[in-house]
Amino acid sequence: MVLVSAYYLIRSIRETEFVKTVRESFLTLVFVAFIVNVTGSTLGKISEAVGERREIYTVYPAMIDTMGDVGAVVGSTATTKLALGALKPSFSSIRNHATEISGAWLASFIMYSVYAFLSLAIQGQLSLYSLLMFAARVLTTNVIAGAIIVIVSYMVAVLTYRKGLDPDNFVIPIESSLADSITTMSLFLVLNLFG
């Protein structure tokens, strides 16, 4: 494997597109590594706050994955519209992307509601009161994390476009890593606020 990689590296080192891709990917890797470390330390703090509440552990992976999907939809559709000229490369043009944003966010809101129900049902803790209380926490996390990830994904798409960088090397890797961190921090905040 190493020999094959070395062969292609030596063979392609003079190709401009190859060097650009490697440079952009390396920059993204450094940024993502930093984000993952922040997420890990926050997750450790959440474990202390969660304690024995298994319903949160059950729903957590789905929450971070779904929020990553929201960011991916917003970022990918924004970069496509920017490339087609259907969207101006400015932060204020986010209002012209409202259909995609609201569609992705609404879908995540529905999914978070389903996650809350399923998590409690799986843990054998389903009652109207427990569902309302747990859904309030989960949906508040969605509102906080969703607002942040939408803005961040859109900003990364616009900045990538303005700088002439390949959005495939930046938008999805950065927003998906940030979605994990943002959702984790939002959940931590909600758990501290609501107990």
Image: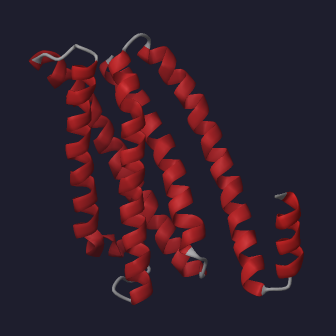
Splitting the image into 4 quarters, where does residue 27 fall? bottom right
Residue under the image location 66 percent in, 54 percent down: 31
Splitting the image into 4 quarters, where does residue 113 fall? top left
Against 103, is 167 above or below?
below
Residue 187, given in percent of the width and then of the height, sits at 39, 31
Residue 149, given in percent of the width and then of the height, sits at 41, 53
Against 85, is 23 above or below?
above
Task: Say left or right for 121 vs 166.
Answer: left
| Residue 121 or residue 28, whichever sits in front | 121
Against 131, is 150 above or below?
below
Against 66, is 167 above or below?
below
Give the number of callouts.
0
Residue at the extreme top? 52
Residue 175, given in percent of the width and then of the height, sits at 49, 56
Query: Quick one: quadrant of the N terminus?
Result: bottom right
Residue under the image location 61 percent in, 77 percent down: 165
Query: Quick one: quadrant of the C terminus?
Result: top left
Residue under the image location 10 percent in, 19 percent down: 128
